């Protein structure tokens, strides 16, 4: 009973409270985080963090990054023509974002490793927030929209790879040589991406029969592959965040087949992912932060405002460097403001690794929430100033 009750409360709050907050026009993720906060120790204290909740949250984190990898669609042919300029823009914007993030952390007096990790977090962005706005405006099918998505994808991949290297360097159990590990990782990625569809084709008659598949064999096969790939990469010493993201990219084509993507989406967003975001609210213990200290307000405001301004400015500068017009550069800058899945995942990992304290994690959560509200408004305003021609 003690194990089931927190699980029930998380599911209940994720379903009913998030629906209530959604009705007052709060974004879904924000509603889930607030729901977890309400039932957690800093709210009504109905539940507390436990091993069961931490385990389910870890599964949710894996599904968050797995779905991010699936939805990234890195090998989409329609975007390949824009990868050259997008790669340059991603490198410029990512490098400047890391530098400004590191400098900001230094000004705030954060330790060296925490400053390095904060800079890595600043590199990431959120495709999930920008994509619907770009799609609804019709810009998604234009060259600028495809370049923006390609840039965001590249930056997310870079931030995850750099974080994975960072986690191996600072870990006492380094294991295999880092260059050997990533050589195996790259080789394994392409072998699995090409090999799994071939294996699936060989066993396709086993997965698809004339009878009704009441056991969801193909869905179970995808889940087995997901766990297997993440476990294999974990044996190499790759952090689960990057491992799950790469698993999504590897299984992208397989999941796109028939109704499997719909089933995976329902399982992830219907159960595990809401638990992850709600658990962030549960473990965000604002009550333990001493708001009487002026340094706390300085850190919170600097992280929240600094991230929004830095991301907008550096991506605007990068867009101008690659010869985009002033109007298009503003759209690029606005689209790179939102911070969501990758930011929260890396912040959560930073807390687990002992580099981030409760105040800094709270600042990252609040920054993500604010960015979700600000980015759509600024992005829509910027797109209104675009010329009508392609």
Image (spheres, rainbow, N blue to C red):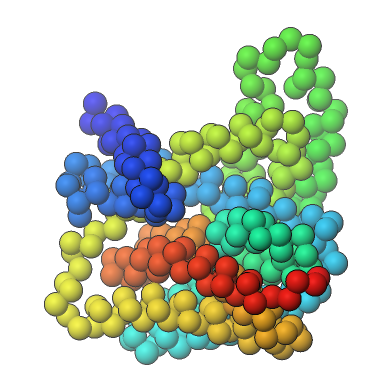
Is 390 above or below relative to 321? above
Figure quadrant of the N terminus: top left
Residue 56 screen position, x and y as percent: 41, 40
Q: Residue at x 85, y 28 (%)?
A: 202
In the picture, the quarter occupied by the C terminus is: bottom right
Left or right position of 317 against 205: left
Q: Is residue 83 visible?
A: no
Residue 356 in the image: state x and y as whole percent: 35, 69
Vertical comparison of 65 with 325: above or below: above
As drawn, the residue found furthest toward the left would be 292
Q: Compare residues 65 and 22 and report the one nearer the observer.
A: 22
Report whether 130 appears left or right of 282. right
Q: Is residue 298 left or right of residue 236?
A: left
Report the front residue among 185 and 326: 326
Total number of numbered discs in the rendering: 0
Residue 272, horizontal then vertical, whole percent: 46, 40
> What residue is shown at x 67% (from left), y 22% (from top)?
217
């Amino acid at each position: 009973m003690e194990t089931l009750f927190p699980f029930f409360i998380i599911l209940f709050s994720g379903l009913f409270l998030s629906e209530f907050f959604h009705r007052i026009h709060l974004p879904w993720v924000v509603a889930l985080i607030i729901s977890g906060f309400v039932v957690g120790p800093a709210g009504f204290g109905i539940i507390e963090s436990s091993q069961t909740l931490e385990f389910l949250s870890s599964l949710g984190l894996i599904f968050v990054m797995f779905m991010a990898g699936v939805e990234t669609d890195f090998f989409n042919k329609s975007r390949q023509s824009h990868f050259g300029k997008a790669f340059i823009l991603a490198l410029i914007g990512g490098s400047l974002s890391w530098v400004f993030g590191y400098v900001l952390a230094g000004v705030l007096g954060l330790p060296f490793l925490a400053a390095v990790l904060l800079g890595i977090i600043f590199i990431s962005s959120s495709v999930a927030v920008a994509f619907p706005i770009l799609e609804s405006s019709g810009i998604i099918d234009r060259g600028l929209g495809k370049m923006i998505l390609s840039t965001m994808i590249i930056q997310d991949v870079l931030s995850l790879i750099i974080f994975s290297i960072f986690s191996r360097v600072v870990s006492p159990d380094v294991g295999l040589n880092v260059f050997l590990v990533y050589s195996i990782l790259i080789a394994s990625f392409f072998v699995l991406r090409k090999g799994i569809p071939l294996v699936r084709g060989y066993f396709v008659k086993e997965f698809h029969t004339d009878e009704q598949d009441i056991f969801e064999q193909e869905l179970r096969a995808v889940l087995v592959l997901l766990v297997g790939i993440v476990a294999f990469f974990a044996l190499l010493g790759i952090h689960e965040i990057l491992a799950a993201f790469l698993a999504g990219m590897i299984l992208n084509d397989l999941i796109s087949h028939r109704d499997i993507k719909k089933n995976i989406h329902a399982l992830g967003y219907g159960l595990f992912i809401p638990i992850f975001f709600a658990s962030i609210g549960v473990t965000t213990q604002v009550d333990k932060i001493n708001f009487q200290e002026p340094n706390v307000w300085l850190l919170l405001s600097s992280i929240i405002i600094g991230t929004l301004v830095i991301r907008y400015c550096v991506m605007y500068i990068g867009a101008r460097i690659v010869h985009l017009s002033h109007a298009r550069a503003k759209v690029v800058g606005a689209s790179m403001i939102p911070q969501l899945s990758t930011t929260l995942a890396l912040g959560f990992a930073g807390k687990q690794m002992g580099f981030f304290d409760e105040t800094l994690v709270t600042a990252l959560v609040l920054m993500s929430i604010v960015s979700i509200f600000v980015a759509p408004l600024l992005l829509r305003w910027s797109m209104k100033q675009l010329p009508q021609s392609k």
